[in-house]
Image (tube, grey):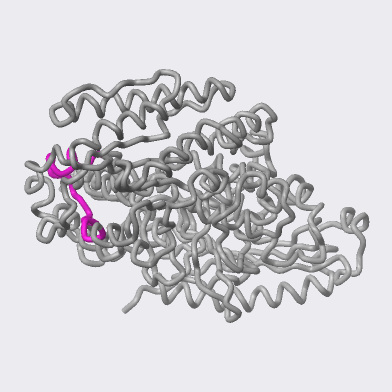
Amino acid sequence: MKFPYGISDFESLITRRFHYVDRTDHIPLLEEAGDQLLFLRPRRFGKSLLLSMLENYYDLNKADRFDALFGDLAIGKDPTAEHNQYFVLKWDFSEVSPTGDGEEIKRNLYRYLNSRINDFSNYYRSTLGSAIPIDHEDAAVSFQGLLSAIRETGHSVYLLIDEYDNFANELMMGIYQGARKSRYQAILSGEGCMKALFKVIKATAGSRGLGRVFITGVSPVVMSDLTSAYNVAENIYLQPQFNDLCGFREAEIAEVLSEIARECHLSGSQVDDALSMMRTFYNGYRFSPDAEQHIYNPTLALYFLKVFQRDCRYPRKILDSNLAMDRGKMHYIARLPEGRQLIFDALAEENPVTISELADRFGVEDMFYAPKDTSFVASLLYYFGILTLGGVTPFGKLILTIPNLVIRKLYAESIREMLLPEGKEGDMAERAAEALYQQGDIRPLCDFMEKKYFKVFSNRDYASANELTVKTAFLTLLFNDTLYIMESEAEIERGHTDLTLIVRPDMREYLVLDILIEFKFVSLQEAGVDGKTLEKMDDAALRALPAVQAKQRDAKAGLARYQEKLRRKFGDVLRLNSFSVVAIGFERLVSEAEPRQMFPASE
């Protein structure tokens, strides 16, 4: 079995016999959905391969290759009447450079489009008879010339546009810089080049030669700014029948893991462990409120499976570096109104992020200048794949949740980078965390919290502070997916005030400890002291405060309950070190280590 990691060319994938998760059964559904479709998914979710599959299916020049490419797939057994009936023109806007002023971006776009139209002319020369004239000043004119040329043939064009919003989003994410804002407006406002192009697409659809259009992208923001020019696309990205159009189902992952296990001579329990690992880190996406099944990120899943097959062990790095760019999106979100607070709240999970509906018509002007609640920002996090649909409240509102641990890591790292921009402070935090991982010593981490981290947190509203806020602060410093599985729903229910760091099964050969921390919070009012007095108190005086002692007793009882749950789940493999941490305001911490838990082996 060969995994097509990084391969988005369908013909190459099939010809070279890479593993392909068949989604051709969705082709009839796509044809029924409409002639002009808009399909949105987060980046690196398989959209380009989907378009390549459609390109090969509809291309009239590949009619003699139909059986070779599709014979073993679902659609090959029952093809639609439209297979191999179109001239296919494909544009990938990620290839358009967003650099320069508005005029230069226009030239970049027209140069790219003319190049693709010229390639189209050469590819279909035997059918067209003569070359398509190219207008070097205006690619929209070249496109109209293309449509004129094909109208004589009896076939129409299927236009595929990949990453329609890519270069526009590049500009949008730098919109706080005035020059970039003017560049964005230059391509999307008034008679900007993108708007002019989409006007032509709209005008030529149907009888004038453009038969079908399929557009992929990440968010609807750019499409909203194109509304007057192109308001005819059917939005299919929230429809339940297309929830799994891109991405993998769990049953498909399990089947592949079983085959790898046979090659690697692994046991059934090791297959179960691997599936649990992948579910925790990569599963969790749901793109329709009416869909029940959660979807795995395909890029991350293929990365894991390829390494697992090659080495017969899990990848050391769980987050594929190809997704590192999403950190930039997180920083961009943090600069938006309500964005920073929403990132904190999503990671804390005290109150789920809820919205009445996903916003699907909001342009750049709306995002920055219209009065708003969190719905714009929360919706953008959904489209970026940083939140996903988690359910519906009793009052009918949509619940948005962090899909998995890989994305939770992005949250934790983003908050840490916001609060600790200096590199040396990050190094200090890492050494303090290592003292906990390796020696079971939590004091260095608590000292760092008091002296560095709480100084940044202190401007947050004390009225809303609680144990979960403190837990979030610790989580951002302790998140380590190389060694640990953290915050897994399989062990402890969400929303509790504990933090669990369970050593990954493949990392138990190293001398790192399993960690359980129970957090409690005492307000300054409950403690009966003010901030200045608290700052001068030594550890013994803090421990003597009645409110602190009461919280420590509660924490001890909570630890006992969670220790039992963990014992039942993991048995004697745990090297569990448990701690209670009581925060007094965002000023001081009182920590206590519980006796080491040595669980007897199961009989």
Q: Position of residue 222 (x, y in %)?
A: 53, 44
Picture residue at 30% right of the left edge, 39% below the top: 6
Q: Where is residue 106 in the image (x, y as percent from the top left)?
A: 50, 25
Q: Is residue 305 left or right of residue 227?
A: left
Q: Is residue 47 left or right of residue 372?
A: left
Picture residue at 23% right of the left edge, 46% below the top: 53
The answer to which of 409 and 236 lies nearer the viewer is: 236
Q: What stretch is highlighted in magenta?
A: 9-26
Picture residue at 74% right of the left edge, 45% below the top: 452
Picture residue at 47% right of the left edge, 72% below the top: 566
The quarter of the picture where residue 255 lies is bottom left
The answer to which of 225 and 344 lies nearer the viewer is: 225
Q: Is residue 179 left or right of residue 297?
A: right
Q: In this view, does 551 lie to the left or right of 395?
A: right
Q: Where is residue 522 in the image (x, y as percent from the top left)?
A: 79, 68
For the C terminus, give its image quadrant.
Answer: bottom left
The answer to which of 414 and 497 lies nearer the viewer is: 414
Q: Does the magenta stretch include residue 167?
A: no
Q: Is residue 25 magenta?
A: yes
- Vertical order, 346 against 139 (above or below): below
